[in-house]
Image (spheres, rainbow, N blue to C red):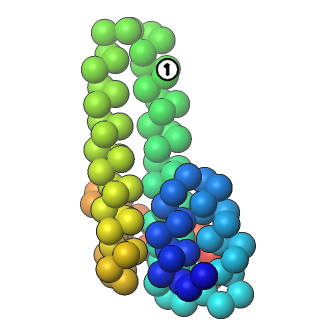
Amino acid sequence: MNNKTLSIISYITPFGWIIAYLIGKDNADSLLKYHLRQSLGLMIISILFNIVMRILVSISPALGFLGIVGLLIMIFWILGIINAANNAEKPVPVFGKMFEDKFAFIG
C-alpha cells in the first residue's frame, strides 16, 4: 500500500489506524505521519467526548441533546479523510493544530 492509502485508512476505526501505523512505519513520508497524528488526536477527542457525554447524561438525561455535537466530530473525520485523499497536510478544524506536534512516537 502507498502512503496516501495508509493515510486514508488511518481515519477508519482504531484498527485502521493500527494497520496504517504498522504497515507504514518503516517507509512513512510526511503525509502519512501527519495524518496518523491527526487521526489519533481525533480518536482521543472522540473517546473523551463520549465519556463526558455518558457522565452528563447519567446525571441529567435532559442533556442528551448535546450528543448532536458528536456529528461535528464525525464531520471532522470526513474532512480528515478528504485531506488525506487530496495529499493535503491541512489540520482538521478546531482540534487539528493541537496535534501537529504531538505524538512523537509517530516520527
Q: Tell whether 60 sits left or right of 68.
A: right
Q: Tell whether 46 sits left or right of 95.
A: right
Q: Secondary structure at mark 1?
A: helix
Q: How many marks?
A: 1
Going by the picture, which residue comes out furthest to the front? 1
Residue drawn where x is 38% and y is 9% of the image = 60
In percent of width and height, residue 71 lies at 31, 39
The answer to whether residue 15 is above or below residue 36 is above
Report the amino acid beneath label 1: Ile
In percent of width and height, residue 32 lies at 52, 80
Residue drawn where x is 65% and y is 90% of the image = 27
In percent of width and height, residue 15 lies at 65, 55
Quarter of the C terminus within the rendering: bottom right
Toward the viewer: 25 or 23?
23
Decide if residue 105 is in sight here. Answer: no
Decide if residue 13 is in sight here. Answer: yes
The answer to whether residue 27 is above or below residue 42 is below
In which quadrant of the rendered view does residue 81 lie? bottom left
Q: Tell whether 45 sits left or right of 62.
A: right
Q: Tell whether 96 sits left or right of 59.
A: left
Toward the viewer: 106 or 102?
106
Quarter of the N terminus within the rendering: bottom right
Residue drawn where x is 63% and y is 76% of the image = 106
In which quadrant of the rendered view does residue 16 lie? bottom right
In percent of width and height, residue 103 lies at 59, 69
Q: Around disc 1, counting alpha carbons within 10 Å, would you say few (fewer than 14), some (14 to 19), or many (20 or more)?
A: few
Residue drawn where x is 54% and y is 65% of the image = 10
Instruction: Report which residue position mark 1 lands on.
Output: 55
